[in-house]
Structures are given as C-alpha cells and as structure tokens.
Image: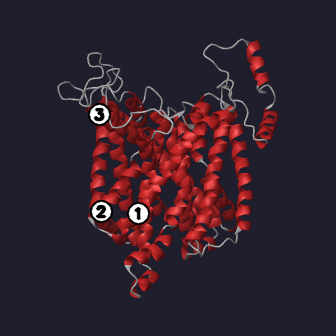
Amino acid sequence: MSAGPWREAARELWANKAAVAALLVLALLVAAAILGPPLSPNDPETLDWTHVAADPGFAHAHWFGTDRLGRDLFVRTLAGARVSMAVGLIAGVVSLGLGLAFGAVAGYVGGRTDDLMMRFIEIMSGLPLIFFVIFLTVIFGRNQFALFIAIGAVGWLTTARIVRGQTLSIRRQEYIEAAVASGAGTPRIIWKHVVPNVIGPVVIYATLTVPQIMLFESFLSFLGLGIQEPSASLGTLIAEGAGEMEAAPWMLLAPGLFLALLLVSLNIFGDGLRDAFDFRERR
Amino acid sequence: MLRYFLRRLAGAIPTLFIIVTLSFFLVRIAPGGPFDEERSLPPEILANLQSAYGLDQPVWAQYVRYMRGVLHGDFGPSFRYKDFTVTELIAQGFPVTFELGTIALALALAVGIPLGAFAALHRYSAADYAAVSLAAAGIAIPSFVLLPLLALLFGVYLHWLPVAGWEAGSIRHLALPVFALSLPPLAYIVRLTRGGMLEVLGSPFIRTALAKGLPLRSVIARHALRPALVPVAGYLAPAVASIMTGSLVVESIAGLPGVGRYLVQGALNRDYTLVLGMVILYSALLIAMGLLVDLLYAWLDPRVRFER
C-alpha cells in the first residue's frame, strides 16, 4: 500500500484547526505531567509545615498553593494527572484487546456463534455496567490491577461492535479465501489476517474511549473506590478539593481544570481523527 | 403492537432475574460482612445477629429466601440502617432522586433539541460553533467537577443560590444539581440532534417538500424534525443511565437526601439487601426506559415494525 490514504487523512486532520489546537494542548499537558514532577523542587508527598493551605502565587515555591497538609498542589496535580493518564492508557489497551478479540471472532466465525456473541453484547450493553464495576472495585478493594481490568471491561462493548462490522466487510476478500485455501486454521487467520486489517479504525475509536475511561476512573476515585492514598489521581484530588472549596478553592480549581482541559482536548482530537479517517473510507 | 409490547415486557423479567442473581452472589463473594466493626463483636452476639438475619444458613438457602421475599414485594431489612427495611429507605429517598433526575432529563431535552436543530439550520454560523463547543465541553467536563465550581461561584462568591442542602419544594436548592446533572446528556442531545438534522435536511424528501413551495418552518416542523430525532430516542436509555450514575455523586456533593448514596455505601458496608434493592430499582428503571424508547421509535419512524 502506498502512503496515499494516510497522507490524505493527515492533510484532512491538519486542516481541522480545532483538532490541531487540541493536539497541541494535549502535548503540553502530557509533557507537563511527564516532566513536571522530576523537575519541580517539590515532592508530591512531602509535607511543608511552613506553608499549610497556602494561596497560589509566585512568592513561595508552591505555584498552585498547597493543601491542608502543606503538600504542593502543582506537583500533586501533575502526579495525579500521570496516574489518570496511565489508567486511561492501560484500561484503554485492555478494552481494545477485549473488543478486538471478541469482535474479530464473532465476525469471522459468523453463523450461530456470531448470533450468540452479539446477543451477549446486547444484553451487556442493556445492563447498568457501572454497578458491576462498583461491585468489582469493592470486592477487590485496593488492587489497582483489578481496577484497570474493571474499567477496561466497560469500554470494550462498542469496540467489539465496530470490529465485528469491519470483519464482516473483509471476510469474503480474496486474501482470506487464499489463506483458507492454503490450509490455515481459523485462529491463525483471525490473528494473522483479520486483526491486522481491522485494527486501524479501532485504534482511532480508542482515542475516544480513553477520555471516557479517564472520566470513569476519576468518577470512581471521587467516590473513594478508585486510586487509594498515598497515591492520588485527578479524581481523588478533586474529591479532596471539593471538601475544602470554601476555604481553599485552588485545591478544587487546579485538578478540576486540568482534568476538564485534558478531557476536552482528547475528545476534540479524537473527533478530528475520526472525521479525517471517515473521509478516507467514504470515497 | 400490543403483542410486541407484552412480549418485550415478558423478556425483561429474565433479564432482571439474571441481574439480581448475579448481584446477589457478587456482593457475597466480597470479603467481610455487614457486622464487621472496628471492635469485633463477642461471638455469641455475632451468632445471634447472623441467625436473626438468616446469614447462618447456606448461601443458596439465603438466595431462595431473598428471592421469595422479592417476589412478594419485600426487599428485606437493611443490615446497617437498623430498624429500617430496604423498601422504607428507598421510599424515603427515591422521590428526591426521581425529581432531580426527571427535571435534569427534561431540561436536557428541552434545551438540547432546539439548540441542536438551530445549529444544524445555521451551519457554520457563530451560533453553530457555540453549540458545538458547548457540546464538546459538556461531554468532557464531569458533573463532580462542574457542580463544586458552580457552587463556588453562585453560592460562595455571589450568594445567589444555596451552596448545598435540601428543602422540600425549593427550586433554588435544586437549580445547581439539576444543571450539573443535565449538562452531559444535554451535550450529547445537541450533537445527536444536529447530526440527525443535517442528515435529514440533505435527503430527497425534504428537497421535494421545499420544491413544492412549502415554507421552511413547516417543512422542519412537519417533515424534518421527527426523523431527525431518531438518534436522540436511541440515546434516551443511556441518558437515563448517565443521570443515574451522575446522581450518585451529585447528591452527595449537594447534600440531597436521595437514594444515590445507598449504592456505594451499601456496597462498602456489605449491606447486602440495600445494595440489591438499589440494583433492582435502577435496573428496572433502565429496562422500562428501553421499552419506552422502542415505542418512541415506532412513533418517530413509521417504517419501524414490531415483527421480531
């Protein structure tokens, strides 16, 4: 394949000023989260008793102020953003993998298996999944690995549907027939031929799943079910800040605005990416 | 159509049954029990408590007993709120949650649909960009960030509205939580209406109607709006789910005495019956919403048939 369609999609994306701006903001936020904590003179867990609940300002070293225990909010927000981003990425990969495997098998095998698997998806998407995730997080408690799995398990249903649709459209293509004719088994065909050919649109869709997952993680953390002390995500920081809102509003504003900016830019960039690639498929 | 409706209603019962069964065993797999305290109870008292609530029996016997109760409309006693049955707790809190949720949904529809339609009719205008930006922000900003910020602005700084709390019949106390709760579904509805409207406006039957010389206003009202709202109807059940989950945090931030807190608290306290009662309530509501959506589809798009 030539680079043609990719270049065209890239040009389309570049013409979308909102998406480009969102990508810039996103790059800035990610760079701040990665580079901020090691470069800052403060540590997210060190208590500074000379500056407890200090206002934001440049007079002291705490640009975003400090919390009740004198911990620097600038570093805590960035460290929390790191945790939120990590959860978004890992749970995003989990949901991508689940959806890819499920959708490719359902679409390729077809027939009764497909009916059954899609019926399962239908029932699952009718359920209040959030309640099950709440159960799971309560049951497994402080196990953060289980948290990733539980959150990732929420986003995979739509992915599976998209993958199945894509698989159905390539199932009858010559290269699949050739693989069947040369005696390749079904698992091999799915892994070697179906998955690589449907992964593109799914990865693009994943850019829209990641902000949903991050939103959900901060929701759980806000409820006290997600990330646990001493580590903090944006959700736990927002929960702390909401409690201190009247006395120390910056405790809410710093993580709240960071999360809002992150999610808005991720969504806009994801939309732009999807539009750019849809354009390619339409012709 | 009535037959279809009844069949769907009958199909909802096994779904609900599966949900309740799954939840029943899931909460019991969780380590710990409802009577775990900081200071452990003397074994005799613990044994008495457990036999009083039937926890000394095997799990399947508890399950049979619980399900029999549910079928008779009895959701059992709460394990943590002593002297309250789950039915009483839900009956106390649900009207608040229901009021909050229905107003939020009504607001999302009443503002979202006209705004989305207006944006589609004035594509690429300043109003369109404003609506699309509002939608982007509304989808991304979680209600638990928005509500404290609004409370800070309107409650703490401007003193226009109460920061939190609840008084029966007071609209002022509901204003901020309702707004925070309705913004995410409102944003989706703007998007869906705008998208649906743009698609319908480009279709041949609209061109025909306009070519006949019908005024734009009546083409939109009589021909375009109904098919354009099909995606919005499909979103209604997720919208209710989003409002339900949102109310879990919004009620606790705004200090409203609804049922939202029972789900998470109940799960943390291993208050088995309370959690199950909440799951049944929320699932039944969601399933009912799904049924309503199916009927709406038929009204919005006469091509939809009730065959399957």
Label 2 sits on residue: B127
Mark 1 vs mark 3: which is more N-terminal? 1
Question: Residue A123 in the image: x percent, y percent?
Answer: 65, 55
- Residue at 40%, 63% (x, y): give it: B114
User: Does label 1 lie on the same chain as label 2?
Assistant: yes
The residue closer to the viewer here, B28 or A171, is: B28
Position in image of residue A252 (x %, y %): 35, 33
* Residue found at the far left of this picture: A59
Element assignment for label 2: helix
* SS under mark 3: helix
CA neighbours of label 2 inside 10 A, class few (<14), some (14 to 19), many (20+): some
Which of disc 1 and disc 2 is earlier in sequence? Answer: 1
Closer to the camera: disc 2 or disc 3?
A: 3
| Image height of A168 relative to A36, above or below | below
Tell me if residue B5 can be seen.
Answer: yes
Depth check: give the residue in front, A181 or A15: A15
- Quadrant position of residue B187: bottom left
Which marked residue is nearer to the observer: mark 2 or mark 1?
1
Q: Name the residue under label 3.
A: B157
Residue at the extreme bottom of the image, as rendered: B212
A238, B119: nearer the viewer: B119
Q: Which amino acid does label 1 sit on?
A: Pro
Label 3 chain ID: B
Q: Residue B229 location in percent, x, y?
A: 49, 67
Query: In this view of the protein, can residue A283 be seen by the observer?
Result: no
- Find residue B114 and name its label: 1
Residue appearing at x 61%, y 73% in the figure: B304
Distance between the Cα atoms at labels 2 and 1? 12 Å
Q: Which of marks 2 and 3 is nearer the N terminus?
A: 2
